[in-house]
Image (tube, rainbow, N blue to C red):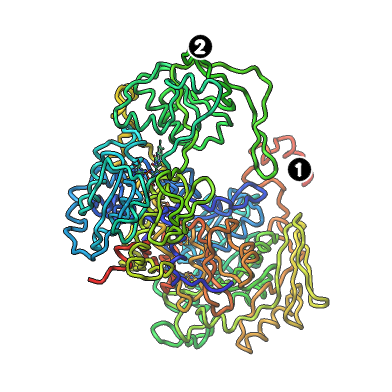
Amino acid sequence: MSFHKPTFAHPELPINKVGYRKKDYEGVISTLCAGCGHDSISASIVQACYEIDLEPHKLAKMSGIGCSSKTPAYFLSNSHGFNSVHGRMPSVTTGANLANKDLTYLGVSGDGDSASIGMGQFVHVARRNLNMTYILMNNGCYGLTKGQDSATADLGSISKSGSENPFQGIDLVGLALELGASFVARSFSGDKSQLVPLIKAALAHPGFAFIDVISPCVTFNNNKGSTKSYDYVRQHIEATSEFDFVPKEQPIKVEYSEGTGKSVTLFDGSTIYLDKLSNNWDPTDRYSAINRIQEGKKKGEIVTGLLYINPESQELHKLLNTVDTPLNKLTEKDLYPGDGILDRINDTFR
Amino acid sequence: MKPTDIKDPEYFHKVVDCQYACPAHTPVPEYIRLIAAERYDDAYMINWESNVFPGVLGRTCDRPCEPACRRGRVEEEPVAICRLKRVAADNKGDVKNRMPQGPFSSNGKKIALIGGGPASLTVARDLAPLGYEIDLYDEWNKGGGMMRTQIPAFRLPEEVLDEEVNYVLDLGIHTHFNHYVESMKNMLTKDYDAIFVGTGAPKGRDLKLPGRESADAHIHIGIEWLAGVAFEHISKVGKKVIVLGGGNTAMDCCRTSRRIGGQDVRVVVRSPFKDMKASPWEIEDAQREDIPILNNMPPKEFVVENGKLKGVLFGHVRAEYDDNGKRKLIPTGEPDTFIEADDVIIAIGQDNAFPWIEKDIGIDFGKWDIPVVDRDTFQSTLPKVFFGGDAAFGPENVITAVAHGHAAAVSIDLYCQNKNLKDRPDPMTNLISQKMGIHEWMYDSGVVDDLRYAVPHEEKKLSLSDRKIEVELGFDKALGFKEAQRCLNCDVQTVFNTSRCIECDACMDVCPTSCITFTNNGEESDLRSRLMAPANDTSQDLYISDILPTERIMVKDENVCLHCGLCAERCPTAAWDMQQFFYNVTKASSGCLVAE
Ligand SMILES: Cc1cc2nc3c(=O)[nH]c(=O)nc-3n(C[C@H](O)[C@H](O)[C@H](O)COP(=O)(O)OP(=O)(O)OC[C@H]3O[C@@H](n4cnc5c(N)ncnc54)[C@H](O)[C@@H]3O)c2cc1C
Ligand SMILES: Cc1ncc(C[n+]2csc(CCOP(=O)(O)OP(=O)(O)O)c2C)c(N)n1
Ligand code: SF4
Ligand code: SF4
Ligand code: SF4
Ligand SMILES: [Mg+2]
């Protein structure tokens, strides 16, 4: 088994606007099981960060515990990172973000990490609209502890050992919509052509951007009867749109047909293009998104794509009206303006 | 594009860049691995099978394999393939018992080999074990051809050459040394079933300039002069020497001069330095011996005073290239330069010469006295006469002569059995999985970062004091191991099984050099534009799978694959496997054995 990736890269790799090759966004070699969906998501993160010209040192990778939460080691070796306790990634990210809002925050989590032990954290980070990208690597099981059913396992899904899940699965996409998340999407680790632009858009979105990525666990949940296996997902996937994300200043090359097309311009000037494949659904309308998902569920479809986006999203710092300077850069001088000013303020209350 | 047919032996052969580029198709990575495993005898024998002169070639080969080596495409320099061969030769034990053991039972056929260079010796090596009775003729007193007469002893010690020539001659070859063949007509009257001509390109070009005749005593033709030194008819040269010419012969002449009296030795070329034909390493070696190379100076006149050579007068030019890259040398108008010289050596090329082949016996000649020879069969227009080595298509090098020898031996063997010469047996190939455990391979799949190691040299003063002291000391075992580890094992192929792939993308994601892409099919140029990394080198193939369940295909650009095996290690279904590909070029001894 090789634990070292050769250092050689393709000699003609193109360089992005900030001077890096895609290789410069990679991490160390993965120790996850060969074929794990999580590795494909890592590769998509690498691709997305390279494509949006993000400087690696301006990103912080946050995670909890689980195979999924191990992945930050396997991408962006030159970024900041915090591997927190099980289920606590959201609160650690909230703290980090409040202290330094100049970094881009990318949290990755598992379905166990988010929908069981970390459920309380997930709920609050969503409703606070923290400016972060939250990628759920959803395999319907606790991969790291040998594949027990997780809270997102679908009712009736069969585990590797043959038992049928008797419980209703939690759909974190539905929950996020209910909680007021400002960017909600679902995708599949095996569909990079959809996942990469979604991650790019999520990173650009100002506010809580949640992507539920179905990510098969090849070892414990890729069996017949599992609703999170490669085969099952491929058979039941239903994309809501052809999707593309175009960062500010990049030429637009999408073409879409009259009537079904929709473009959403984000706060930073970048644009999302959607060519809708579903009718009766408007991605900027939360309730139509909820309906579309329910409708799909009834038909046994796994509805993917960008499901909802609030173009007017106000992220946590806006809501709290914090100063422009990141809090960790405020000096004693900034925080303590001196006795004179303090007296003047106090006087106004007299 | 159509799915790749990996059953075609040439597909994977081409992936092994070094082996493919080697005229004799030596299984390079295989012998390099054996060197790393300290199995020097085995490494030597793999070479001996393919190229007959591992010890000679490990010191002198023109190494067409090295510019082809994939390592040169992912870092600065290729693997020192050539000098590793020498490690095998230097460290082997007694290998004679592993070679064919005579006496061989006769098959009743008799053939003549004219010329005793590497081409003829290869024919002899391949045919003797099949029962052919072989007569070898050479004008000199020993075998080896130009390997003996031209390649100086400081690059190739005589003992090394003798050993490898004798391995062949000891197979029961009847040698006729000191025997210049004067007439082909006469040869044809003898009872030979076939005749092979391996007489080389023995005529050195002269330079007819004013003063040439009157200064003749101190003006020498390079290859004649080198032969004179090799056979010790010449043991001295003047203090001031000018060598004219920019090829490898010129390099050997100037370096030899430095060892037999030349103190102020210069090489003068008429065109730019960068156009010199000599191998870069030979130029380097000459410069290291304090030999300046002056360029853009065409000679105009041998200056003679009182019937004695004084030196050479040179003009000055600059090179201009037209749109087709064709060069023109244009005088710069600078005043001519006179350089003093006690001796001048002319090393400006060699030609074929067949004064001994009568023109009316059915052997046709084309331009420049070069015989008309079939490129595949090496047969001349007279069916029982075959040509090979420098004699066939003009001067090349030892490894090309060997490759010709193998092919000509196949032809002669077919000819003697009245078979169709164009109906050539296939090469021997084999594909063996390297899987040992779940993620363990039989080969060392790690890719080391080490840069190319330099071969240690003898101390300069000592090596210049005696023309028989070898300059290069060779890699010792430890250095040889390190250099061997740089090899990427390009013969361990990535073999894809479409029906096993579940399209998890793991292989595509892990590949360090972005070789693998899963995408929709298309025409080659379209596909090349849509891969994970640029795929602009069209001489490197794309490996195309059958259609996968998602309607996509797997495309692998072979160009910079490191053969690291990570794709196969990360594949959950073993859709990729690492398999060692062995390719053994068709040889008379392996392909078409004569009836027992
Ligand atoms: C100075 C010099 C340096 C070289 N260095 C290298 C090197 O480092 N590496 C490399 O790969 N190549 C080198 N070469 C080229 C290489 O030596 C030849 O390409 C190679 O030896 C050709 O082999 P061959 O079998 O065709 O014939 P040769 O080696 O030329 O042998 C032909 C033999 O036939 C003999 N002969 C010719 N006519 C007759 C006749 N009528 N009757 C009997 N005998 C005859 C000749 O005397 C000679 O001995 C060098 C060449 C020169 C001139
Ligand atoms: C506080 C705490 N409780 C329990 C565990 C044991 N544990 C480790 S990983 C894990 C579940 C991980 O599942 P998930 O988040 O879905 O990640 P996956 O491995 O499936 O990617 C559990 C319960 C722990 N590490 N810490
Ligand atoms: S790396 Fe090794 S196998 Fe590959 S081309 Fe170079 S020498 Fe040959
Ligand atoms: S062996 Fe596989 S992983 Fe390694 S470079 Fe080649 S294609 Fe890529
Ligand atoms: S790792 Fe194996 S199964 Fe996965 S895509 Fe590659 S070949 Fe197919
Ligand atoms: Mg999980």
- Give the numbered dot on residue A88: none
Secondary structure at numbered mark 1: helix
* Outermost residue, right side: A258
Out of A11 and B111, give the one closest to the viewer.
Answer: B111
Residue B537 percent location from the top left of the image: 57, 56
Location of residue A236 (image quadrant): bottom right
Quick one: label 2, few (<14), some, or many (20+) residues within 10 Å?
few
Residue B400 percent location from the top left of the image: 41, 50
Residue A234 percent location from the top left of the image: 56, 80
Residue placed at 68% from the left, 63% from the top?
Answer: A201
Q: Tell me the chain of label 2.
A: B
Location of residue B148 (image quadrant): top left
Secondary structure at numbered mark 2: strand
Out of A176 and B129, give the one closest to the viewer.
Answer: B129
Residue placed at 24% from the left, 38% from the top?
Answer: B159
Going by the numbered disc 2, the residue's amino acid type is Glu
In the rendered image, the quadrant that contains the C terminus of chain A is top right
Going by the numbered disc 1, the residue's amino acid type is Ile
- Give the numbered dot on residue A345: 1
- Give the numbered dot on residue B305: 2
Residue B156 percent location from the top left of the image: 31, 37
Residue B520 seen in this snapshot: yes
